[in-house]
Image (cartoon, helix red, strand yellow):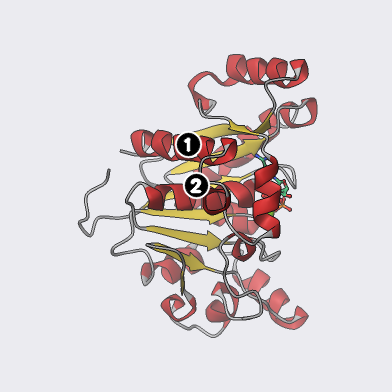
Amino acid sequence: MLGKSNKRPKRIAVVSPKGGVGKTTVTANLAEALVGRGHRVCAVDLDAQNALQFHLSSDPVDPAGLASATLRADDWSSVTRQGIDKLRFLPYGFLSEAHRARFEAAVVDGPAWLSDGLSTVDAKNIDFTVFDTPPGPSEFQRAAVELADLVIVVVLPDAASFITVPTVERTIESYAGTASRDFKGLFFLVNRMNEGRVLCRDVRAMLSQRLGERLVPAAVRFDAAAEEALAAQQTVLAYEPEGRAATDFDALAAWMEQTLR
Ligand SMILES: Nc1ncnc2c1ncn2[C@@H]1O[C@H](COP(=O)(O)OP(=O)(O)OP(=O)(O)O)[C@@H](O)[C@H]1O
Ligand SMILES: [Mg+2]
């Protein structure tokens, strides 16, 4: 476990080239699993879909978030919400169309908007910051990767995900290459793993051969509790703490502790 000093938080970007593969589910549950292991964690939603708040039981009608705070040059601590235990949560928030265009224009000049915004939120007393991002390349994905110590690419155990590997490697490595810090690298996480299906096992074996140690050993298995938890606006860990997915997210958090030690 990390010490409780004021040292810089470890930042994790959760990304994917494809939509709907489980980025938001992974962000919410990795954050909560790290909290369960005694860490102080900040979950940050960089996706205008605002889906992360539904996993974290946050108030979905409050429009305030990091987007409006950036436009108003407000301190991001004013829009940070307190989640379960030590989990802090920064929602993206809601913007009018005109404000959305202004915000998106403001984020294209590098990740300063994100590092400045976070400086009042995670600079002290946070061990891990986890970024949820929109699917595919974007300025939000770029900013998260540029600030990250480690990037998790979420993939499904299917052919469609496998063929995206070279492209996502090139994109993320080009983003990460512009960062000037100790970057641990790009790791792939299989989500919705089904051991009972030959195709899933075959694709995971191909990923393992292609990626070696860059395939996270802790795959997250398919678990209906993941979908039910979202319907109940909870993380899987809160909804069914002894279930398959909850167990796998805890294993992912343990791997993350080791890798970012
Ligand atoms: N391990 C799992 N087992 C079963 N269902 C899962 C699992 N992980 C995620 N899901 C379900 O898959 C759907 C998509 O998940 P999620 O919203 O996290 O994907 P996403 O990558 O964030 O999507 P988007 O690209 O739209 O942001 C949700 O209904 C979620 O409950
Ligand atoms: Mg999402």
Image quarter in which the N terminus is found: top left
- Label 1 element class: helix
- Residue 85 percent across, percent down from the top left: 39, 62
The amino acid beneath tag 2 is Leu
- Residue 112 percent across, percent down from the top left: 47, 65
Packing grade of label 2 (10 A; few <14, some 14-19, many >=20) is many
Instruction: Name which residue lies at 51% across and 68% down.
Output: 90
Assign ligand 2 to one image quadrant: bottom right
Residue 110 in view in this figure: no
The residue sitting at the right extreme is 160
Instruction: Name which residue lies at 47% across and 52% down.
Output: 31
| Image-based side of 175 in relation to 38, left or right | right
- Label 2 element class: helix
Q: Nearer the viewer, residue 112 or 91?
A: 91
Image quarter in which the C terminus is found: top left
| Image-based side of 49 in relation to 259, left or right | right
- Residue 19 percent across, percent down from the top left: 75, 47
**Residue behind label 1 places its C-beta within 8 angstroms of ligand 1:** no
Q: Is residue 219 above or below residue 76?
A: above
Instruction: Name which residue lies at 63% across and 40% down.
Output: 171
Residue denoted by label 1 = 252
Mark 2 in CB contact with mark 1 (< 8 angstroms): yes
From mark 2 to mark 1, how far is it between C-alphas?
7 Å
Q: Is residue 260 above or below residue 162?
A: below
Residue denoted by label 2 = 30
Packing grade of label 1 (10 A; few <14, some 14-19, many >=20) is many
Q: Is residue 250 above or below residue 12?
A: above
| Image-based side of 198 in relation to 110, left or right | right
